[in-house]
Image (tube, rainbow, N blue to C red):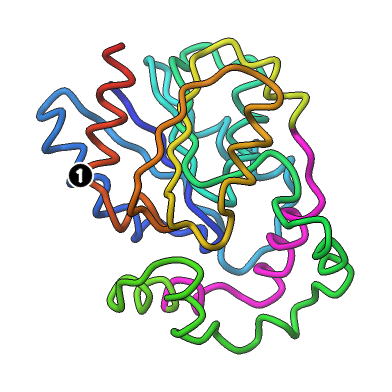
Amino acid sequence: MHFVLLPGMHGTKGLFDWLISALHEELGADFRVSVVDYPNDQPLTIEALVDRVQRAAPTEPYVLVAESFSGPVALLHAAQEAKQLQAVVLVATFASNPLPWWLRWVRLIICPVLFRRPAPLWLLRWWLTSDAQLAIATQQALRAVRPEVLAQRARLTLTLDVRSQLAEIGVPVLYLHGACDRLLRDRGLAQLRGVRQLSAITLEDGPHLLLQALPARCAREIRGFLLR
């Protein structure tokens, strides 16, 4: 099976290393992977991001795995004519603005200035993962992205609504969710469940960075889903 991986806000390949190793353990030689990374120096529209995925899609059957920021990108791609797409795995992600209603005003103040300094480690450990080394790796990945690019991705997160496209997807969908996700909690899953039936698995001690914190368990759940 060929897996196409779509990254979170950082847009880079490196934070998938843990998952790729775990998938190799689960699937052995019957496994190929492509990671679609996003440029760290060029703000892209949602259409450009989807086009990037379209051009990277293999000509053989594949599974799309999208985490966090890339969820809407994956849903838009899957709703188009993705001929060889077999399944979609969504991880700690959303289909529309994931903030609670009383924080929706935040989208009005998103600008590059907010991203000129790296997010402090204590905040990353609170929101994304309790693991110190993983928080450091995430901070370094975000630091490599220009502030205007992060601002553009944040704006997309808070303004996109692709729930209607979710209903058009004709392949099975799995949603992996961490019960300890302090960033999204269960809001992303609730959005998706309100539109269509899907398989949902909650990892009880999973943070927002689920694929990085619990890669072996995520790989097992993905393999089990595909076998079913």
Q: Residue 194's quadrant in the figure?
A: top right
Few, some or many C-alpha atoms within 10 Å of disc 1 (few <14, some 14-19, many ≥20)? many
Judge left or right: residue 125 versus residue 188. left
Residue 210 picture location, percent across and down: 38, 52
Report the magenta residues as a range: 140-162
The N terminus appears in which quarter of the rendering?
A: top left
Residue 124 picture location, percent across and down: 47, 75
Using the image, determine if residue 74 lies above or below residue 136: above
Residue 46 picture location, percent across and down: 73, 45
For image coordinates 43% across by 50% down, the residue present is 179
Judge left or right: residue 52 versus residue 108. left
Q: Secondary structure at mark 1?
A: helix
Using the image, determine if residue 40 lies above or below residue 220: below
Residue 191 picture location, percent across and down: 68, 36
The C terminus appears in which quarter of the rendering?
A: top left
Q: 131 and 154: which one is in front?
A: 131
Using the image, determine if residue 107 lies above or below residue 74: below
For image coordinates 43% across by 57% down, the residue present is 180
Judge left or right: residue 76 versus residue 158. left
Q: Residue 218's quadrant in the figure?
A: top left
Identified by mark 1, the residue type is: Ala
Query: Which residue in the protein does label 1 denote?
Result: 216
